[in-house]
Image (cartoon, rainbow, N blue to C red):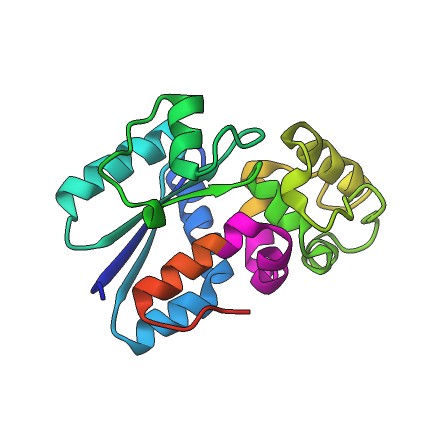
Amino acid sequence: MTTEVRIYVEGGGDTADGKARVRRGFHEFMHELVGIARQKRIRWNVIACGGRTQAFDSFISAERDHAEAFNVLLVDSEGPLQAASPREHLKTRDGWALALAKDCQIHLMVEAVEAWVMAAPEGLKSYYGQGFNENPISSRRNLEEEPKDGLEPSLKAATKGTKKGEYHKIRHCPDLLERTDPSKVRSRCPHCRDLFNALCDELGAPHLP
């Protein structure tokens, strides 16, 4: 069992504030795992990297500079899966060489992080309040079947009548992650469940429901 978990995630744009908000959003979204890590005195770090390529580069560097840690790469799939595993998808789509990393370290948000925040509409309602229209939000049981091109437009349509205005990835997504029920995401987004299971395994804990 490791003494440190480091999760390299895309998001946050180019500003320190944007990256800090992404760190907080994912930290809160993974609060169950954070609690387990604290009990076991395992250090927990979410590193917001900005773009996908920056996340990949940072992950590769971490495998060298933080070899003692359990390093995790987490990026959007950016489209339908093109292979049976996240590793092969990223090799096929992006040309990324991840041969030295283990499968349990490589994870995807399919087809994008918006599927995660859509998986639990209660969080959207709580955040946007009056004027939120749930009708455009997909009711698919498996939200990984929802095309990426439809995710943001659906969220924009659902939120355009609210005081916060229509959905904006950098401004809104981190706050939404803080309000999103991870158990509902795990039930509707299989690759999110895979991520949580891999982290539970590394933490020496039972899988979460």
Q: Is residue 186 magenta?
A: yes
Quarter holding the N terminus is: bottom left
- Position of 118 compared to 169: left or right? right
Determine the residue positioned at 60% across, 49% down. 116
* Count of numbered tags: 0
Frontmost residue, 65 versus 88? 88
Residue 29, image x, y percentages = 51, 59
Left/right of residue 63 with respect to residue 126 in the rendered view: left
Range of magenta residues: 176-193
Q: Looking at the magenta stretch, what is its main secondary structure?
A: helix
Residue at 29% across, 33% down = 98
Q: Is residue 176 visible?
A: yes
Q: Is the C terminus in the top left, top right, bottom left or bottom right quadrant?
A: bottom right
The residue that appears at 39% across and 57% down in the rendered structure is 198
Residue situated in front as seen by the camera: 180 or 88: 88
Residue 93, above or below 178: above
Q: Position of residue 173 (x, y in %)?
A: 57, 45
Which residue is located at x 78 percent, y 45 percent? 162
Residue 47 in view (yes/no) = no
Q: Position of residue 13 (x, y in %)?
A: 45, 33
* Quadrant housing residue 19: top left
Can you give x and y, in whole percent of width and height, for residue 87 in the image? 38, 36
Nearer to the camera, 32 or 164: 32
